[in-house]
Amino acid sequence: MRGLKLGAMVAALVAASLPAMAETTVLNHVTVIDGTGAAAKPDSAVVMTDGKITYVGPSAGLKVPQGTRVADLPGKFVMPGLIDSHVHVGMMRDVTQDVKFYDRANVEADLKTYAAYGVTAVQVAGTDKDVIFDVRKDLRAGRPKMARIFTSGQGMVAKGGYGGLYGLNVPISTPEEARKSVDEQAAKGVDLIKLWIDDERKMIPVKMSYPVTKAIIDQAHKHKLKVWAHVYYLADAKELVRQGVDGFAHIVRDQAVDKELTDMMKAKGTWQIASTLSREIVYSMAVMPWINDPFFTRGVTPGTLTALRGPAREKAVMLGAIRFPGLPYEKRLFADMGRTVVQAMDNYEAMIKAGVKTGMGTDSGPNGRFPGFNAHEELAMEVMAGRTPMDAIKSATSDNAAWLGDKSIGSIQTGKWADLVVLDEDPLADIRNTKSISAVYVAGNSVPTVWQTCRGRPSNACTGGWKDRSPTPY
């Protein structure tokens, strides 16, 4: 009897919450993984009305108005859309990176690819042209059908140093120039400020100085903007924490992190917002093990596949040196990357054990790191480094939303945007099951999944589904 009364109450609440002529969709009889770290809830329903979640709870007794779209999905799993906290968009054509490729069409193509992989929001790491503000404005004005975007505009790079997108970022060398640059980005309306402090393993003679990083951090905080930093060295990470940096865009990779760093980060609330483990492992691979996996091939262009499958790439990665545009040096990526991957994984595990705030970010977008795809590889590597699948999912959903300060996304809760991923298999049993994407919703809009995508080709040019995937190396 109590069950019947509860069902009637739920029905009344749902019906009362639905405005006249509202667009409502119900995902019924699903297991909900809400992104907060709470236990999964089987036989649940999620009600989406005009793009927002209006009910999440037991399916028992749920009644909705006549005409409502109801999808009965027993055996399926629903989790929040992933948030990738470190990406670059619009800069690539196949495997070539150039500022001239950056335009609205290329940005939106990337955002649609992210969404197809269940990544419903991204944070761009300081390599955006100003057109990004129009894209962001339009996405926030309504109910988007591609990934939401948070932008750092043009991040801060040292004159003659490492970072940014050649031809876009304006280099700085003094605290005065740093403050002026921050003011310019703040006036444009950036969501946060990004800086690079690195010398590519001592191969560049210039690295951003500590007086300049302090000026950036202090000036950004005057504008009430967070600052996140590309770092490589432990010493730089420690100094930036002392200066008040809010988060790191990469894990320390030159040596083991120590208790001094993790204690400082916890005391100051500094985030390891992106660890980019999947970035490091890609650089250590001469041949990518997923090169024929439809989960990968559907989301990249034909030119990308041709380049990655060619023997010239394998030789170049293993033996060749690469000269990056605008930089007066060459580097051999392959030689040191095995050690770097191991150090990155060890340091990530140390951060988790120490209780440092962590998010999920991939550094996807540039050559070798692939929009959407890398997010799933990153989750698998987080678990390999010691996280539970539940904690890995939380890092990429509610934790990343907390970093962004956006209370409207990141978890499946009443009143939030219905940014959702429906899975065929349980990601808590195996984190690699996040690839079993059955449906993706952004603001309640059903968007094409990766299994319905064929980037840069006619839709019938791609074959293969979830059951045809290649085994993952992790």
Image (cartoon, rainbow, N blue to C red):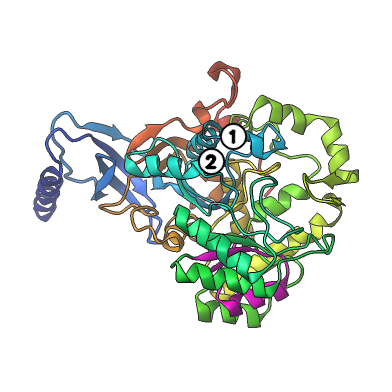
Residue 388 in view here: no
How many marks can you see? 2
Where residue 240 appears, as percent x and y from the top left, is: 62, 74
The amino acid type found where label 1 is placed reads: Phe
The amino acid type found where label 2 is placed reads: Lys
Magenta-colored span: 226-249
Q: Mark on residue 295? A: 1
Q: Mark on residue 435? A: 2
Residue at far right of view: 319
Crowd band around label 1 with a 10 angstrom C-alpha radius: few (<14), some (14–19), many (20+): many
> Residue at position x 58%, y 68% from top?
216
Crowd band around label 2 with a 10 angstrom C-alpha radius: few (<14), some (14–19), many (20+): many
> Residue at position x 32%, y 40% from top?
142
**Is the Cβ of the residue at disc 1 closer than 8 Å to that at disc 2?**
yes
- Residue 399 is left or right of residue 417, and the answer is right
> Residue at position x 58%, y 27% from top?
455
- Residue 431 is left or right of residue 368, and the answer is left
User: Residue 224 colored magenta?
Assistant: no
Element carrying mark 1 = helix
> Residue at position x 39%, y 52% from top?
33
